[in-house]
Amino acid sequence: MVQAGTGPSDGPNTTTPELRPSNDATTGSPHNGAASGNPASNTATPTSATPADASRGAGAPRGPVSGNGATRSIPPAPGAKAAAVVTAAHRDNLFRGLVDRAAAAEVSQERMRHLLDAVLSVASDLSLPDVLRRIVTAGCELAGARYGALGVLGQDGHLVEFTHTGMTGRTEAEIGTLPVGKGVLGLVIKHPEPLRVADLAQHPEAAGFPANHPPMTSFLGVPIRVRGEVFGNLYLTEKVDGLAFTQEDEDVVVALAAAAGMAVENARHFDRSHRRERWLQATTEVTAVLRTSLCESAGMDLLAERARETAGAVLAFVAVPAGPEHLRMSAVDGVLADELTGECVSTLDSITGDVYVTGRSRVLTEVAKATLTRSPSTFQQLPDGISELGPAVFVPLSAGARPCGVLMIAREHGGARFDEDDLRMVTDYATHAALAIDFADAQQDRQRLALYEERDRIARDLHDLVIQRLFAIGLGLQGLKRAPGTPDAPERLTGFVAEIDQTIREIRRSIFSLQQPTGGPYSLRGEVLRAISEATVTLGFEPTVRLEGPLDSVVPADVALDLMATLREALSNVVRHAGAGSVALTVSVDRHARRLRLLVQDDGSGLPENIAHRGGLSNMVQRARRWDGDCVIDSPGVGGTRVDWDVPLARHAESQEGRG
């Protein structure tokens, strides 16, 4: 450093900024160093003296002077410090350097302010998709990039999500599929360190661009870590000034990535908690319906419906055993409900059957409708262009040694994959549903056992009371026969008739109070009354019931089963959606025994708006069409919802006669 000294009258000593010698040897340059002289000298030597130098007195600081092309040093005056002669050119140069440094410092402070603003913006949101978009936008603004993207990595190290900015929707559509992590992008994935490339085309790892992709030259990639693990990579391309990204750009983006990692972690915690809360709500609702045994099919429909809604999926189905080697899709909710409802799949060569037999869940990155009934091997690689659905998960409905069914959930093509948290939540949901189903089955077994006990009691009552009463009436009639002309004969005969009538009423009451067990003679009247009794608990009030015509004698059992399934589905919908205060239902057979009709009317809120893909409603219609009938579900002018299910009995009766 060069010191500038003063005489006794110049005040305190001052220090000027260091004057560094230049390698430029051009004469007259303000940066020109000494051409000769003492090599240890630190003075900056101008090539000629100025008039101001000549006018200085003997006590003024003296610097080196030159004459006749040679340079010589003039020793300082006695008692004065060594001084450097600073020319006007030197002062201008120093001033410009200070201004440049101040401007650079101001620019750095401005970028720091922008970085802090970006960090606050990223950390202010708890929605993970919004956080990812904010990170990409902030990175582009800080580094001056035209395009930006954030690729999220899956467990296998491949890109599973790609959030980008800078391209128009039309350009994105023309490009087609999103990047999969090859080329320079893959290099950042394999080696998670900051990477700057001046020209992508010249990089040895460059894999080129797909058709219709905008040109990109400069590149900056920075990994984003969450708890020490690489969550994804931030990619920035095409610096707006046409130059390459600088070290300062890299530093500020690395700082942003560090803050982004913490923001992503917070957003993931919030997202996980929110999803867990939604799954718990769905679990509570579904298990409550399944445990009531109001309607097994309605419970399965709700199980599929809530699974699809909670997972943000487009399709969900529940497959239950239908024989030793088949599963039937008993409840389907979503875009393919009409096509898949009732579809059977093999337990031997289908993905659904594999999950049912092994009891192990399966997570797929892509699934097509055409492959839902194929061998599990076909799910490994699907040809391009046939996929109609996206990521899917198959989970067994298992609460014990053997599952009671399989739950499948599929998102739309290109949707988010099911991660470990998703699988854990869906598995818990399915397990609780299976426990509720087992509880309902156990409850039915207890009811069946109680029914058998009730039958034994009635048999004893018939033996002890009715038969004894009939025996007594018979004895009395025999006595009356031997003395028909006695004065009290008419009175006694009237008493015997009354006893017989009373006995008949007791027998009828005992018969109609019975509930038919599974596999026994089917009583449609008894099943309707049983369903109403069960619905009363859930509804909170007793529905009004009308039973008309010979329901138990002319309605075939398989038609009656479809009617009961429709009735239970209608009552379940009242419980779940209507918010009704009263329900009136009628089950009738016309006087010619040619048509069977079920009419359910409530005074609730009417049909929901989003009923396009509800499996339960379509099931009611399909059950009517199976018998060449019809089912109309509407909201009449008086309000509420009305289900009018009507099927002919003549065709089925004729087919039964033909078999006989």
Image: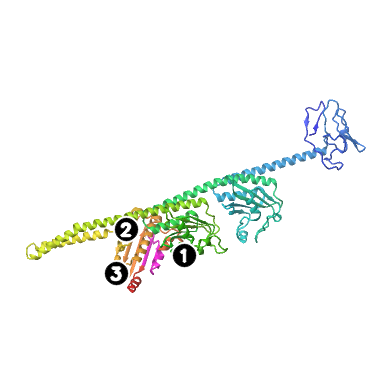
Would you say residue 205 sits in the magenta stretch? Answer: no
Q: Position of residue 439 (x, y in %)?
A: 37, 53
Reading the image, the residue beneath label 3 is 591
Q: Quadrant of residue 96?
A: top right
Query: From the image, which quarter does the C terminus lie in?
Result: bottom left
Crowdedness near tag 2: few (<14), some (14–19) or many (≥20) residues, C-alpha within 10 Å: some
In primary-sequence order, the first of circles 3 and 2 is 2
In primary-sequence order, the first of circles 2 and 1 is 1
Query: From the image, which quarter does the N terminus lie in?
Result: top right
Q: Position of residue 478 (x, y in %)?
A: 11, 64
* Span highlighted in magenta in the image: 620-646
Q: For the residues marked 1 and 3, what is the alpha-carbon distance in whole angstroms? A: 37 Å
In primary-sequence order, the first of circles 1 and 3 is 1
Q: Quadrant of residue 84?
A: top right
Q: Amino acid at mark 1?
A: Glu
Instruction: Using the image, tell me which numbered label, if any, was put on residue 530.
Output: 2
Q: For the residues marked 3 and 2, what is the alpha-carbon distance in whole angstroms? A: 25 Å
